[in-house]
Amino acid sequence: MSDKPIIVWFRQDLRLTDHPALARAIETGRPVVPVYILDDTGPGQWALGAASRWWLHHSLLELAADIERRGARLVLRTGAARAVIPALCAEVGAEAVHVSRMYEPWAAALERDLKADLEPAGVALRRFPGSLLREPEEIATQSGGPYKVYTPFWRALRDLGVPRPPVAASAHIASPARAVGSDDLAAWGLLPTRPDWAGGLRDAWVPGEAGARKRLTTFIASALKGYKEDRNRPDLPATSRLSPHLHFGELSPSTIWHAVASAAGGSGKLDADSEHFLKELVWREFSAHLLFHFPDLPDSPFRPEFAAFPWREDASGLAAWQKGRTGYPIVDAGMRELWHTGYMHNRVRMIVGSFLVKDLLVPWQQGEAWFWDTLVDADLANNAASWQWIAGSGADAAPYFRVFNPVLQGQKFDPEGTYVRRWVPELGKLPAGDIHAPWQAAAATLQAAGVVLGQTYPHPILDHAMARDRALSHYEAVKVKA
Ligand code: FAD
């Protein structure tokens, strides 16, 4: 057996369990060089956002410690991966490079380019599945094309049967005889310093594979039952909050699928809550499927008629939205939750998204960019597909006439106002009946709650009824069919 090592190039797969690329490298018996490359050159506008950098720092610390416990060392390098990987191959005399496939357009292109670059040097680039339940090529319509609508996509995925079972992590990873030099993670400057805005993130999250597993176990034990009913309630801890763990690949979707199916009895028949949860997980697959087949999804409207939509440039509206100062409590609560924790509940993402795009008529790409920078689960496919869904320009979009009413949405999904009270404490003393529309409250009620509109909390920056009519007339003008 040659002792030429295999480089395992970690990207959005920061785990050791159910990692086919790593497992296969270990199986060969060769030494393994695990590497992570900080490469801001490839993705352009979609280089890692600030919240993602915070997460990455902590996740890499965990991954490095897990690798060390198995006898090897995570190598950190910076620069253009297309240059760093061949240089590292030459440095360690690699036999091959193993990667888990990615579906972001630049990442998939890079895999192809590197494969071609490395071949003449006799180094193989081997791509493995693991980040999705099914590879994009496994699911196609009868005519062989991509799905554009979720429900038939879900049926097609379900009809393929149970996804492959997860691969266990190896207890030992063999290292090359000579140590390989690595950057110092702290020197990468991924953490915010001046100011350190990450306090809320530290309180909310435990990045890394162990944190991800704990989150999954807790969710299955405490919130899976009732998920279908309660998942729309931002005031309840009713969803899994696995999204950043999934984005960074600290947990594979296959691991989640099998854990949920086995909690549901393992007979193959799922109860309504488990099925609903797995269907949400498959929205992630669907978004990846769309991005794979339509690489312009993050930048351009899927429906070309939207190119002519009369969006508005509204810097002050955008700033009020970003800061959580629109005067609509459920919108402001969501935007402040996002700023504080790097996360926002899905229902509230839909409400704030609708407010930006339909009430303010700000282009969806500006909301997408803000989310990209501030979400710890910022994910190109999920973010782009979701914003296009909200704007009505997406493949399987919300009908254009669906303009979320922020007051009714708040009353329905945060009936006691608990969520608003948590993130907009200046309204905390208002009764539940008034908290979602403080401008409609009686003067005495506002006074008793210590609320002075325009001073302690803003007046609404626009009138929703007016904004709704304006949006509908614009949407009708581009003749979008429902
Ligand atoms: P759960 O309800 O517990 O769902 C489990 C998993 O299923 C999630 O972790 C996620 O991976 C997947 N999932 C659930 N809903 C969706 C969905 N609608 N689309 C795709 N996958 C889904 N999700 C991201 O991961 N990254 C993003 O950048 C992102 N941007 C979004 C932007 C907007 C405007 C909207 C409306 C939604 C966005 N979502 C995004 C989808 C969704 O809001 C989050 O995945 C979800 O809130 C994460 O919370 P959870 O893990 O508790 O979800």
Image: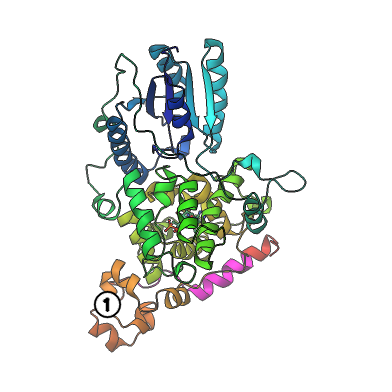
Q: Residue at x 45, y 36 (%)?
A: 19
* Residue lying farthest to the right in this orientation: 143
Instruction: Tell me where residue 74 appears, x and y as whole percent.
Output: 32, 28
Q: Is residue 427 visible?
A: yes
**Image position, residue 240 (x, y; %):** 41, 58
Which residue range is magenta in the image? 458-474
Q: Does residue 323 appear anywhere in the picture?
A: no
Of residues 451 and 109, the one nearer the viewer is: 109
The C terminus lies in which quarter of the figure?
bottom right
The answer to if 411 sits in the magenta stretch is no
Residue 415 position (above or below residue 186): below
- Mark 1 lies on a secondary structure that is loop
Q: Is residue 193 left or right of residue 295?
A: left
Q: Residue at x 65, y 39 (%)?
A: 137
State the image coordinates of residue 373 (x, y, percent, origin top left). 39, 47
> Does residue 432 sit above or below 188 in this rendering?
below
Name the amino acid, label 1: Val
Dominant secondary structure of the residues highlighted in magenta in the image: helix
Name the quadrant containing residue 91.
top left
